Image (cartoon, grey):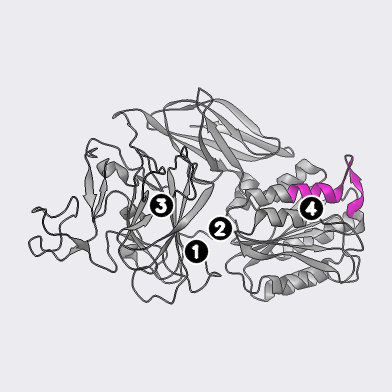
Amino acid sequence: MKRRTRTGWGGRGIVIVALAVLAITAVLTAEPATYYGVTFQHGDRAFADRVVEYVVASCVRDAYDDPEEALGPPDATPCGCSLCGGVVPTSAGHPSNRIELKACAGCDTNAVALGFRLSDLDPRGYLVVEFIDNVLVDGPGADLFVYITNDHPARVEISEDGMNFLYVGQAVGYPGAIDIAPYAGSDDRFRFVRLSDVPADEDHSECGGPSIDAIGAMGPAEEIVVGEEYGILELQPAGELSLSLTRAPDSLLIMLDTSSSMGESVDGQMKIDIAKSVIVDLLGALPAEMYVGMRSFGGCENSTLISEIVANPDREWFKSQVLAIQPAGATPIAYALELAKDDFAKVPGTKLIILVSDGMETCGGDPLAVARQLIASGYDLRIDVVGFSLGQDNRARQQLMEIAKASGGLYFDANNITELRQALAVAAPFTYTVYDAAGNAVYAGRIGDQGPKLPAGTYRIVIDTSPEIVLEQVVISDQQTTTIKVQRSNGGYEAQVGG
């Protein structure tokens, strides 16, 4: 999804990445607490502690777009309590412990709204939160409770590492209960929850979509020593890599040249096999919310839509289709680009074509003119082009560069499998893993996203570039941010550790 700063409400996107970490203090109690009929054995520790990411869909007014309102225990305005005046926090119950309180249905400034979509084609609003001093595990009955102040359902996903999310159902109500038993093993421990809006009829309220007040987990509390030293780790793209990642699209169409010349060898492998291998790896690295499709072209007026552009496609099926491709025929770049207009017809948001070819147009078309027409049709689109193993074919290189330039896209030369992987990284940020001094993986994330809060100490960082970068003895200091800049360098990548 395209990320924007706040510019008002109504059809505009908001993203707040990694808001301030909620302080863990002695105020949080480990005594049981009951909120609207649900008793949490570890009290306020049961509730989400940190906002990792927030992207709003359409029509949410400023009063309802603060994601920190989803942290901590439920505090929406209660109804039906004449003694309290309807404005007191709702915790274990009414002071008299005889009157059951309930939240007023509708918008509440103590909750955050995700916005709504008219259909699955519209951008999705979502909120990602993290549990710091407790975890979500499978236990008897419901394990996760989402307090939604209006009656709009939320799609619920959970994650151990903040990257790989598992769908566990929909929540609705105050609270909406989720049993993760059908999806989780007895030893699984989840720290992240992602809530997304569910397409529905148009919502004219001021807090469109689900309005989230609190997220509570029934898992065990984990002791955090008060006063323990913590610092922040950030991995950020720099230079050309920063340019490509900051322009990450909502939807991607991979266009692969499958002409007969792709059957030639490079470094002992057929070019087509190298390309297929890299694309298969790319599919596994793309963000789940990105719309992805693929088109091949080989033979005049012969182009196949391998996969329509859809959100979160079946990756294994997609990969099998890619691996079945065989090279044949001439190179109809213009014809394939013409078909791309219809491929994107029902796809929302910003669009990217990654065009991979080992030569120029050979079917008499004018790909540059078609590219310009595609941009003129009104799509928010760019075309990044990879010239694969062009050697000294400067005519082909010039044509491919002009196609990229016409759309404000990037051009890359790639002469082997490593350089092809690097070129296709424009669509998927690299991932990285953090290991503590004992060799345990303690965090996994993507370059450019908010990094983790870690106990002060020394860590090993492994970045999933090609070849991978390994940084030993990275120091995290108390109350400081350690920044690692990752950028292209000398045909590969380098990482520099700063303060």
Q: CA distance from mark 2 to mark 3?
A: 24 Å
Residue type at mark 4: give it. Leu
From what the image shows, is residue 407 above or below residue 118? above
Disc 2 marks a residue whose amino acid type is Glu
State the SS at label 4. helix
Q: In the structure shown, which secondary structural element does the residue marked by tag 2 occupy?
A: loop
Between residue 58 and residue 376, name the one nearer to us: 58
Q: Residues within 10 Å of mark 4 (few under 14, many from 20)?
A: some
The residue wearing badge 4 is 323
Say whether disc 1 or disc 3 marks the residue closer to the N-terminus: 1
Spatial separation of the CA atoms under disc 4 and disc 2: 23 Å
The picture places residue 243, in percent across and down from the top left corner, at 61, 51
Q: Please indicate whether residue 155 sits to the left or right of residue 251 in the image.
A: left
Q: Which residue has dot 1 on it?
A: 124
Instruction: Please report contact status of discs 1 and 2: CB closer than 8 Å, yes or no.
Output: yes
User: Considering only order in the chain, which callout, 2 or 1, is on the residue closer to the N terminus?
Assistant: 1
Q: Mark 2 vs mark 3: which is more N-terminal? A: 3
> Which structural element holds mark 3?
loop
Q: Residues within 10 Å of mark 1 (few under 14, many from 20)?
A: many
Query: Residue visible at 31% across and 28% down?
Result: 225
> For the residue marked with disc 3, what is the amino acid?
Asp
Residue labelled with disc 3: 179
Q: Is 188 located above or below residue 200 in the figure?
A: above
How many labels, in total? 4
C-alpha gap between disc 1 and disc 3: 24 Å
Residue for badge 2:
289
* Disc 1/disc 4 C-alpha distance (Å): 31 Å
Q: What separation in Å lies between label 3 and label 4 (alpha carbons)? A: 38 Å
Classify residue 54 as left or right of residue 316.
left
Q: Residue at x 70, y 57 (%)?
A: 318
| Pointers 1 and 4 in contact (C-beta within 8 Å) | no
